[in-house]
Amino acid sequence: MRRQVGIVDRVHGPVVEARECQSGMMMELVHVGEAGLVGEIIKLSGNRGVIQVYEDTTGLAPGQPVYGTGMPLSVQLGPGLLGRIYDGIQRPLVDLKERMGTFISRGEQIPALNGDALFSFTPITTLDERVSGGTVIGTVPEGERMIHRIMVPPGLSGKILFIADAGSYRAADEIALLEDDTGRKHSLTMIQHWPIRQARPVRRRLQLSRPLVTGQRVIDTLFPLAKGGTVAIPGGFGTGKTMTQHAVAKWCDADVIIYIGCGERGNEMTDVLREFPLLVDPRSGTSLMDRTILIANTSNMPVSAREASIYTGASLAEYYRDQGYHVAVMADSTSRWAEALRELSGRMEEMPAEEGFPAYLPTRIAQFYERAGAMETLSGYEGSVSIIGAVSPPGGDFSEPVTQHTKRFVRCFWALDRQLANARHYPAIGWLESYSEYIDDLEAYWKEQGQGGWISHRRTILDLLQREVRLLQVVKLVGPDALPDSQRFILEVCSLFKRAFLQQDAFDEVDRFTSIEKQANMLKLLLQYWDMGSRAISRGATVIQLRRMKVVQELMKMKFRSDDNWDSLEGKLQRAFDRLELLYEES
């Protein structure tokens, strides 16, 4: 029997005011009106409540009932999530289309998990064994490579009275019976429910010590992201935010990818939905969708559902983290999410802050990014959630509130440069405004890879890029011929570095992904060219002589090399400068 918790009194877009809400609870999931629109109580005052509705409220009228569920807005967790496409409140879009066609009826509810699918369950606990929240009681294969670990829900503990034999079961079938310390019995299935705004508990946070390897040289070498870290990708329209996230999603070494299309244009989200199933996972050779969950919440969908979508994605990520996996969350874009907060705040007549955004915008941004981290889970595994959030500042203005507040709560910043994008230099991550605070955390990893000189090499090349900017300002005034060869060589080396290292071809079979070892070797050779060339110039060589060396063309094309014979290229570089040295001695 449904429990009525109020009566609609006023409708203001997605914000509904209700009276007679004495029995309602804060953040309670409710169904509004005869159509049963999904909503959430976000404010209570006396006998009145304010409800945030996640569907179109057209036709909703005062006097219609509001029914409560007694629980907050939650996600359904269990096997069968991977490869699915959901909206912002975890309704499966493919299932909805099969049921009703292209347009979704309001109030339509379909379980997030397929209730008819059978899963091959293998128990790993025994009768009378004591378990607690997070304990793995069995496993289920999910896809070709993933093992889905069935866990005791957080907050439960006790003794196993029954455990199902190995076999095929539906997700909602009872697979275990637990008796807690009070003697109360709890039936366990493969499904858990978890409030989206509440972070899942863990044993402890771990120090970030491993990079999220993306295969993108400008990221891994200059501005690396640690597994469990946070990064913002700000950039104006057309600078490549979405494509950068696509490249990271495909090539990074995360176990699970969760892509949240939060308020994006419908055509962009359509491209994502069409292209992701066609992408091949480089690690398994199967479809990338086998380890991906898509959350599609386009700009024409109800604005309040956009606000909930990123919490839905974070909850799904934490669930797989608790199983001991490394998860990468792509939020595209948090600016659209912040705009949803601004619209809802305005409809609730709250006092606006900077540029109309609510005063609690920084708090909400912090709450989202704080759900990232490397954790020791309740089950004893180590897992991580890395959050990569795109920011779409109007006009590419990085001083606007969303970008500035996001910078306060992330430790990595990949600023997209309009001039690089216009020059077709991709990834268009600018090296002047970008930064990473994970350098010291990842130094030990690079040493383990036999690349102990990574920090000094990185520092050297960033210093050269900074010097290039100052020299280019002089060149604009007096021309390049006014510079001495020592300074002109800086411009040559930086130009070579940008074309041979920073610029990457996503359509080339070799260049689209670069291993850590190859990145280190490429950087080492470029800096050897810089060191040898600087010494040669001090002994009388000219920039033109250095530029005409045949080995420079090989350095330019080394990103397309698929072999590992870097010593031969290093030998050619050394011999080229030896020949140049002979010319000095003869003269």
Image (cartoon, grey):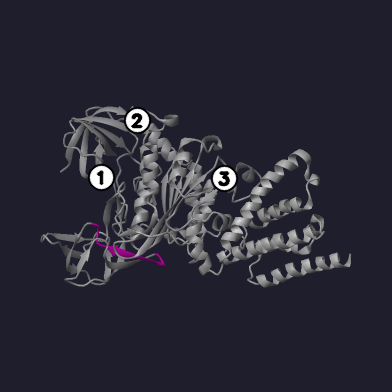
Identify the residue position indicated by label 1 in the image.
72
Split into 4 quadrants, where in the image is the C terminus? bottom right
The residue range painted magenta reads: 143-154
Q: Image quarter for residue 26?
A: top left
Inter-mark Cα distance, 3 to 1:
41 Å
Q: Which of 545 and 264 is in front in this view?
A: 545
Amino acid tagged 3: Glu
The residue shown at (50%, 43%) is: 267
* Eye-nearest disc, 2 or 3: 3
Identify the residue position indicated by label 2 in the image.
13
Q: Nearer the viewer, residue 174 or 239?
A: 239
The answer to whether 531 appears left or right of 398 in the picture is right
The residue shown at (47%, 44%) is: 407
The answer to whether 211 appears left or right of 94 in the picture is right
Q: Is mark 3 on a helix, strand or loop?
A: loop
Q: Nearer the viewer, residue 431 or 275?
A: 431
Inter-mark Cα distance, 2 to 3:
40 Å
